[in-house]
Amino acid sequence: MSLFKKIFSSDKKETLDKGLEKSKTSFFSKLTKAVAGKSKVDDDVLDNLEEVLVSSDVGVKTTIKVIERIEARVSRDKYLGTDELNQILREEIAGLLSETNSGEATDFVIPENKKPYVIMVVGVNGVGKTTTIGKLAHQFNKKGLKVVLGAADTFRAAAIDQLQVWADRVGIPIVKQDMGSDPASVAFDALESGVSQDADVIIIDTAGRLHNKINLMNELTKVKRVMQKVVTDAPHEVLLVLDGSTGQNAFEQAKQFTAATEVTSLAVTKLDGTAKGGVVIGISDQFQIPVKYIGVGEGIEDLQVFNKYEFVDSFFK
């Protein structure tokens, strides 16, 4: 199928394959059971397939769409053997995702007409937010872009310390204040520092509290407003980091954060340690927000741009 042309380099593809290994193994063991003793795709197989997709964290709404597409194909082609099901799934899920704007990128890039390009990163504690920022900074730095970090998650000393470790590791400047400082003040200083250094990218970490949506909304709104005193249209991107290993809980967090602030892109982390990789398919389909990055390992190079064709190709290989 023409959708599946080689996009990634072989080492990036190998990392992606390895990162999705647990999800793929779990999915195919369920799929094998679902079609056991069946030679053609019939109603029973479709019912079982629906259960497999839902239990693989693809999500109910996306699962229904996939099943409907396969049903249409069965009625059109009259006979589909169960041995073809893997290829059919691969094609229909890629086709479904091709209807969204998510996952078209092949490399780490920023718009050419925005300098500095300001990214505000949001997400609950423990999802891999700070690690994602560090790895993203590393990728931009590798491209020769000047990056500045802002440690505006001032409610946890560990968050500031962890971001400092990443800044030192990548070799880029960080703007920080003491724990308990006003996050908006840190963001303001980071943007001023970035502008004065002629930075290409400024990445702002923010607090990961979600127990009170109103407080979170007010805080993030204040951070945005204060940043705009330095860069009038900042932030250019609000990146929500989700932990893929939490499966359906990642959907819930996405709903909560999109209600609290205007999220423009998503990163789904920790896919290598889970069998819940199907969550990326559901999130990519259901939220009208592009999945931009996925975390497929602990190494500094293991944050990848999300490309839906490469992802589906690895998942259904």
Image (cartoon, rainbow, N blue to C red):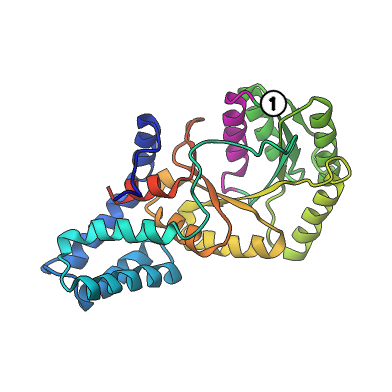
Residue at figure coordinates x 57%, y 24% from the top left: 142
Q: Is residue 286 visible?
A: yes
Residue 273: x and y in percent read 41, 45
Residue at figure coordinates x 78%, y 45% from the top left: 234
Q: Which amino acid, mark 1?
A: Lys
Residue 215: x and y in percent read 78, 61
Residue closest to the eye, 106 or 216: 106
Residue at figure coordinates x 40%, y 36% from the top left: 8
Residue at figure coordinates x 64%, y 53% from the top left: 264
Residue named by callout 1: 146
Residue 78: x and y in percent read 17, 74
Location of residue 64 with respect to 100 vertically, above or below:
below
- In the image, the segment drawn in magenta is 126-144
The reply to whether the magenta stretch includes residue 138 is yes
Mark 1: which secondary structure?
loop
Residue closest to the eye, 61 or 218: 61
Q: Is residue 24 left or right of residue 228?
A: left
* Majority secondary structure of magenta residues: helix
Q: Is residue 196 left or right of residue 99?
A: right
The total of numbered circles placed on residues is 1
Q: Is residue 171 left or right of residue 104?
A: right
Q: Is residue 177 visible?
A: no
Location of residue 44 with respect to 7 vertically, above or below:
below
Location of residue 138 with respect to 25 vertically, above or below:
above
Residue at the bottom extreme of this rendering: 43
The image quarter in which residue 140 lies: top right
Q: How would you rate the neighbour count of disc 1 (Cα within 10 Å): few for under 14, some for 14-19, many for 20 or more?
A: some
